[in-house]
Amino acid sequence: MNPGPNSSVWAGLNGGLIAFTKALAVDFARRIRVNVVVLGLVETELWEKIIPNHQEREEFYKMCSGRNLVRSNAKPADIWEGFWFCMISEQLTGREIIIAGGSLLSGNLASRFGSRFVFTLLPRIPVTMTGPLFSQTPDSLVV
């Protein structure tokens, strides 16, 4: 992912999260697969709070989709396959899966504003984990 102008904090945080994912994958290699799903703009109800005006929100969606390589923004139903791939691929660990419609390749800064990371922690074998994040043995845990 390439940073745009005035995005040094964004680039540092996101680069750190990817490095953190890889480090966790090494630390938990025998027990848990750790991956991160990077999302571009996903049209959800959250945007109603960020851009309350319906017309302005629709213009924002149109601008972002026009700059994406696939010429559309993701909907929640569009992104489940990335998470599913992380869950079923037993050899996938320490990687980022990017679901952003090509926006990161096209330099779509508006879509980058919508990007976020979701960690997927998947046990390799049934293991009891303790701590604030783990209250039981999960089949799949999204943090």
Image (cartoon, rainbow, N blue to C red):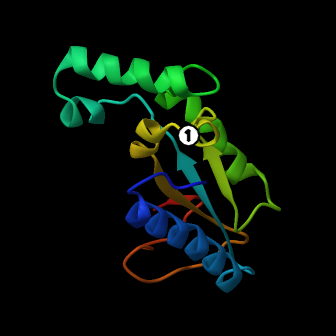
28 displayed left or right of 74: right
User: Which residue in the rendered view is the most extreme toward the top?
Assistant: 55
- Kindly identify which residue carries mark 1: 107
Q: Is residue 72 above or below residue 110?
A: above
Viewer-closest of 89 and 52: 52
In the image, is residue 88 above or below residue 106? below
User: Along the line of sight, which residue is nearer the eye, 106 or 100?
Assistant: 106
Q: Residue at point 56% right, 75% down?
A: 20
Which is nearer the eye, 21 or 120? 21
Badge 1 local density, few (<14 within 10 Å), some, or many (20+)?
some
Kindly indicate the quadrant of the structure image that contains residue 78.
top right
Residue 35 picture location, percent across and down: 64, 62
Give the residue drawn at x 45%, y 41%: 109
Q: Is residue 133 left or right of residue 2?
A: left
Tell me: residue 56, above or below residue 32: above
Residue that lies at the very extreme toward the right in this rendered image: 91
- Report the amino acid beneath label 1: Gly
The percent position of residue 52, horizontal first and vertical second, equals 16, 27
Viewport quadrant of the C terminus:
bottom left
Q: Secondary structure at mark 1?
A: loop
Please state the horizontal and vertical placement of residue 91, each as a whole percent of the image: 83, 62
* Rendering coords of residue 101 (x, y %): 60, 32
Report the quarter where the N terminus lies: bottom right
Nearer to the camera, 87 or 118? 118
